[in-house]
Image: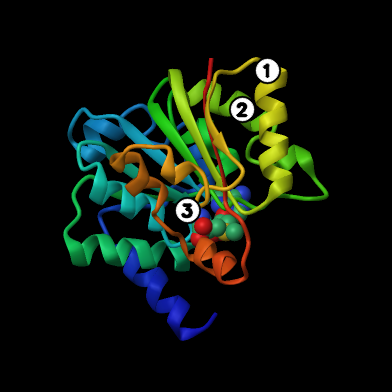
Amino acid sequence: MGKNKQFRFAENRTFQHVVQPTFAELMEGRFPLRGRWNSDFFQRDAPLVLELGCGKGEYTIGLSRLEPQHNHLGVDIKGARIWRGARTVKEEGLAHTGFLRTHVDHLTKAFAPGEVDAIWLTFSDPQLGKPRKRLTSPLFLDRYREVLKPGGLVHLKTDSPVLYEYTLEQIAEQGLPLLEHSDNVYADLVHRVGPGEQAILNIRTFYERMWLLEGRIIHYVRFAIS
Ligand SMILES: C[S@@+](CC[C@H](N)C(=O)[O-])C[C@H]1O[C@@H](n2cnc3c(N)ncnc32)[C@H](O)[C@@H]1O
């Protein structure tokens, strides 16, 4: 492992706002924050917003700046990426903002039923050859149904037309409330929404900035889980 990665992993261990449960803790039902994120980690009762596959955490941080009344948690498996977001949270003194290093497959082991208010999926891998692994597959929608409050929201922002269309199909198949969608966020959607939502949609992640430089078009879907 490179020195840079070693340094980041070591610093992550010193951050109170980075949680790294062990596989055994999660699998054996011993993860102490499950069902207690608001009371024990954020230490306040507020809507809990997750970003799954958060990478360096740009959406988690951007949402935290815009919506400080919510509790924000970025989830990713890669510690060196989470470190970037965790460092920014510390440098800016952003309150009620943290990171969970775990596999998204362990979502229901890390969160109790109905504990989460909203989930952001930002530039998730479209898993072109493996639809079952897409973060909006029926398998994942069932997991979201478990951890989200009734009517909880899922937001998808993606450069992938395949993932965008697939998500719309899943929403239709499951009869879920489709609240907003656009196949071109910056040419269409941002001009139709109010300034608050515009600011949220204008948050750009590391991957989004790369794809925009390549000229890719950005898609967005918001739906509720029922
Ligand atoms: C394409 S990147 C997008 C990162 C970030 N959202 C962005 O837009 O810059 C996908 C992210 O998902 C994370 N990821 C992939 N599979 C994962 C899994 N099974 N559990 C948790 N994170 C995962 C990767 O580590 C990576 O940071």
Q: Nearer the viewer, mark 3 or mark 1?
A: 1
Residue with the most extreme right position: 129
Q: Are marks 2 and 1 in contact (CB under 8 Å)?
A: yes
Q: Quadrant of ligand 1?
A: bottom right
Numbered label attached to residue 193: none
User: What amino acid type is highlighted by mark number 1?
Assistant: Gln
Residue appearing at x 47%, y 53% in the figure: 54
Q: Nearer the viewer, residue 118 or 212?
A: 212
Q: Is residue 89 depicted above or below 147 in this figure? A: below
Disc 2 to disc 3, C-alpha distance: 18 Å
Residue bearing the label numbered 1: 174
Residue bearing the label numbered 3: 54
Q: Position of residue 142 (x, y in %)?
A: 62, 24
Disc 3 to disc 1, C-alpha distance: 26 Å
Q: Earlier in the sequence, mark 2 or mark 1?
A: 2
Disc 2 to disc 1, C-alpha distance: 10 Å
Q: Is residue 97 depicted above or below 216 in this figure? A: above
Residue appearing at x 63%, y 40% in the figure: 135
User: What amino acid type is highlighted by mark number 3?
Assistant: Cys
Residue appearing at x 23%, y 39% in the figure: 42
Residue appearing at x 67%, y 31% in the figure: 168
Q: Is residue 96 depicted above or below 14 in this figure? A: above
Q: Nearer the viewer, residue 204 or 71?
A: 204
Tell whether circle 3 marks a residue whose Cβ is less than 8 angstroms from ligand 1. Answer: yes
Residue bearing the label numbered 2: 141
